Image: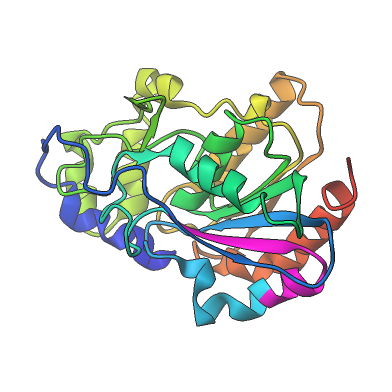
Amino acid sequence: MKKTFLSIVTVIIIMGCSNEMPENQGKVQSILFVGEDENQPLVVGLGGGEGGNAWASDRWKPIRDKFIKEGYAFLALGYFGAEGTPEQLDRISIEAVHQAILDATKSPKVNPNRIAIIGGSKGAELALLMASKYTDINCVVAMTPSHCAFPALTFGASTSSWTYQGKEVPFVPTPWAAVPSIIKHDLRSAFETMLEDKEAVERALIKVENINGPILLISAKKDEMWPSTEMSNLIVKRLETKQFQYAYEHVADEGGHSEVLDYFDNVHAFLERNFKMND
């Protein structure tokens, strides 16, 4: 995930971009891994701004295999930067990602009524956003998440990362005031500057209270990419204010953006308590 946001340094400097939809918009790469059991709960893996289909890679095989061993089916989704998908994280169709999940539930091995999504960084943003719109998603694990939508990772960074029902999802724009921080590779400061636009943040907030199941947030106190702990705290505050009916937890690691990947024992325990056997 560290690689994820370094690309922003080169894309946000010049504002403005084409209004044309990206090539392959609405295309998703999905690879389903299943075990021997019947009626397996489905765990969906969404990568971050590094692109490709990270969860299908050899690097993630041990983590993927552990889910299979524990009785889950696992769906690795690449929503940009993978073969046949958009080249950049720009106006990704939320409906297309959701449809790929539904297609996976047609497998006779998969329980279509038990769907959990795990996303890291921009993938966490997508996981929370998608689950807030589709009630058939029963659980979210968001690692170093945001509480609102941010711009596309493109040369202009002037479009949304996501579309829903044919329209761009409202996002927090990148002001010129953030550019000096970006040039210095101080991305956290750049995002903190972006978050000063309270009206834009309000428009771009993810309505996490609409999520139809438990939520686990794992953040990094020393996150060098964006203030994931502060944004996770705001998610918790919103859940409290809205009297969210499901379980939710926030684990704040003392380290940086990528160190939260050491917390998969917490993820498995949370799913076991709150998701796997709950109908």
Figure disc tally: 0
Residue depicted at 44% across the width and 57% down the height: 48
**Residue 231, x across and y down, in percent:** 53, 39
Residue depicted at 32% across the width and 59% down the height: 84
Asked if residue 259 lies in the magenta stretch, the reply is: no
- 192 or 117: nearer the eye? 117
- 202 or 94: nearer the eye? 94
Res 230 visible:
no
In the displayed structure image, the side of residue 216 where residue 231 appears, left or right: left
Res 140 visible:
yes
Residue depicted at 17% across the width and 48% down the height: 180
In the displayed structure image, the side of residue 109 where residue 224 appears, left or right: left
In the displayed structure image, the side of residue 78 where residue 173 appears, left or right: left
Q: Where are the magenta residues, as a range?
A: 65-78
Quadrant of res 130: top right
Q: How is the image coloured?
A: rainbow
Where is 91 relative to 262, above or below?
Answer: above
Where is 244 relative to 88, above or below?
Answer: above
Pick the quarter of the image with the C terminus: top right
